[in-house]
Amino acid sequence: MIVFPQAHVRPDAEPIQRLFSYGTLRQPEVQRTLFGREVPTVADRLPGYRLDWLTITDPDVIATSGSDRHPILHAGDAGDLVEGAYLELTEHELAAADAYEVEDYTRAAVVLESGLDAWVYLAASA
């Protein structure tokens, strides 16, 4: 059974989704392009995964990120740990992040080192 991260609600806004990023989604210029603003970002780590590199061919993604080499997550050993941060996104912003990620990635629910639930983009072949 898939368990989805619980959205939390700020008192003055719509529900917020956590999205763990270990790559380009942490870049302020990428956030401004995708979300129209820099989003709240909190440092955290993801246990049990390892980073690899992917060559991106989508010209729009390359133009947004400034690079054709993006990190990608694969399942790892229990001792593996990926540094990153979670972004606090609205549902609309999460949909924009989904549209930005190429088909080599798939979004999945994870538990971060902090114990918080979040979404993350993993290798689709994992």
Image (cartoon, helix red, strand yellow):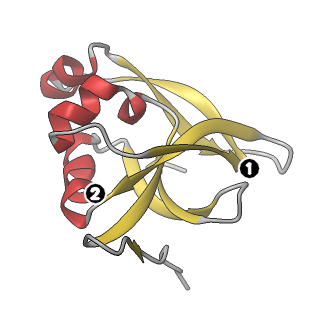
User: Which residue lies most toward the front here?
Assistant: 12
Q: Say few, some or many: other residues with alpha carbon within 10 Å of mark 2 (under 14 / 14 to 19 / 20 or more).
A: many
Which amino acid does the dot numbered 2 rest on?
Leu
| Residue 100 percent coordinates (x, y) | 22, 41
Which amino acid does the dot numbered 1 rest on?
Pro
Above or below — where is 48 with respect to 36? below
Residue at the image position 70 percent from the left and 65 percent from the top:
115
Please name whichever residue, 79 or 32, is drawn nearer the observer in this view of the structure.
32
User: Which residue lies most toward the bottom here?
Assistant: 1
Above or below — where is 43 with respect to 48? above
Residue 89, by quadrant, is bottom left
Q: Is 35 positioned to the left or the right of 124 in the image?
A: left
State the SS at label 1. Answer: strand
Dot placed on the residue nearer the N-terminal end, 2 or 1: 1
Residue at the image position 58 percent from the left and 28 percent from the top:
52
For the image, the number of numbered tags is: 2
Residue 45, by quadrant, is top right
Residue at the image position 59 percent from the left and 63 percent from the top:
110
Query: CB atoms at circles 2 and 1 under 8 Å apart?
Result: no
Give the number of the disc on residue 29: none
- C-alpha separation, residue under disc 2 versus residue under disc 1: 22 Å
State the SS at label 2. Answer: helix
User: Which residue lies most toward the right here?
Assistant: 79
Nearer to us of marks 2 and 1 is 2
Give the number of the disc on residue 94: 2
**What residue does disc 1 label?**
47
Residue 43, by quadrant, is top right
Where, quadrant-wise, is the N terminus in this rendering? bottom right
Residue at the image position 37 percent from the left and 70 percent from the top:
10
| Residue 91 percent coordinates (x, y) | 25, 66
